[in-house]
Image (tube, grey):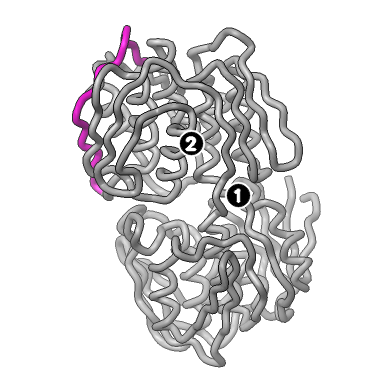
Amino acid sequence: MDKIIIEGGKTLKGEVRISGSKNATLPILAATLLTDETCVLRNVPRLLDTHTMVKLLKSLGKVVDWDKDKIIIMSNGKTNPVADYKLVSTMRGSICVLGPLLTKLGEAKVSLPGGCVIGVRPVDLHIKGVEALGARVNIDAGYIIAKSKRLKGSRVYLGGASGPSVLGTANIMMAATLADGETVIECAACEPEVEDLANFLNEMGARIKGQGSPRIVIQGVKKLHGADFKMSPDRIEAGTFVLLSAMSRSSFMIRDIDYQQLMALDDVLAKVGVSVEPDKNCVRVIPPRTLKPMSITTYPYPGFPTDLQAQYTAIMAVTNGVSVIRDTVFPDRFMHIAELNRMGARIRREGGSAIIEGVKELCGAPVVASDLRASAALVMAGLVAKGKTEIRRVYHLDRGYENIDKKLMALGASIKREKE
């Protein structure tokens, strides 16, 4: 197991390139189960989660050739309907194989998923959706077991207690591609990653309209074919580097970024006092001498992303004044608070909110990463802290940030990776 050691206080400069989107790659990899023909995916990030999904595809009968950032997925002639616990339990995104397996094979046995410990994330909307399409579903010994001779189009409402489900929308959309008739998903997730998946499915011959809106309409087809598709840039990695630039008072170029996907963040940054200069697929952050405190509430897209909440908490921790952060998507996603407080932050939690009293500086300390985005927040804190920060359990970081230590080193950060 690795750990990361950071000597804080270095000015960052140069440029960094944003990798392909993790949250788009995982369901798109699952979607290749819908065809026996070859699919080519480009700009794929080399992440722990991507490796896990590739292993899962291989266990389900796919042949995968991965060269640099290109993955070629082929069929070996037979698909296994059982997604095993050992792989699915490590990553929530693997629940996305449920819809493709069910609609392609008429059956699926998928282990209940795992992933980051950031609060309760039920699978009820996934089950509700496939049942609406005519599947018979039960839970047995930790597995979702679904069967149907052929799914039938239906109207499916996917609103949950914390808003639309991104993976639920992806799963039902994939299941509906080979169903009989028309499926309408109401209260669908509007995230760009859902759009990417729909665009990939349409490249395969699916008939999907409305992606990116709360109402997606799918006309079922009899068969899907192979496709060649390039992943969009990872908007959460991009947002993390934008926040890091502001927090570290460093101005560096961020390349391969679709800044239009970060308008909620841009709105907040303008109020904090940070200006961002976009230029085609690049941006440069112009940090002010003094940041202003700003309270936020996370919402589903296009609201402020819950996946940037921990990183924003880190920047407010060193901003003079009081700010309140409320997470409506994952109200328990505050495990980074204790670790930031170990570094001198003054943050307390009240229900689904964090109250932050900004301090002048943070001090390096040994800390433990609890989840993917908390890991990024601790790296950001370590880069601006006085002294040395040692972050353990960085496998969380490797799940969603491709070579982040190497990217930071190229910007001038004093950061190294060691075995624990």
Picture coordinates of residue 417 (x, y %)?
78, 56
Q: Which residues are magenta?
A: 145-161
At x 67%, y 61%, the residue is 17
Q: Mark 1 — residue?
A: 20
At x 59%, y 27%, the residue is 39
- Amino acid identity at mark 1: Gly
Picture coordinates of residue 351 (x, y %)?
30, 62
Q: Which is in the foreground here, disc 2 or disc 1?
A: 2
State whether residue 280 is above or below residue 65.
below
State whether residue 211 is above or below residue 416.
above
| Side (left or right) of 364 relative to 326 | right
Residue 159 located within the stretch drawn in magenta: yes
At x 44%, y 30%, the residue is 95
- Amino acid identity at mark 2: Phe
Image quarter of residue 50: top right
Q: Residue furthest bottom?
A: 289
State whether residue 146 is above or below residue 12.
above
Q: Residues within 10 Å of mark 2 (few under 14, many from 20)?
A: many
Whichever of callouts 2 and 1 sits on the residue coming sooner in the sequence is 1
Residue 168, disc: none
- Count numbered badges in the picture: 2
Q: Residues within 10 Å of mark 1 (few under 14, many from 20)?
A: many
Q: Mark 2 — residue?
A: 200
State whether residue 314 is above or below residue 257.
below
| Side (left or right) of 98 relative to 314 | left
Picture coordinates of residue 300 (x, y %)?
33, 55
Give how far apart the Cα atoms at labels 2 and 1 are.
Answer: 15 Å
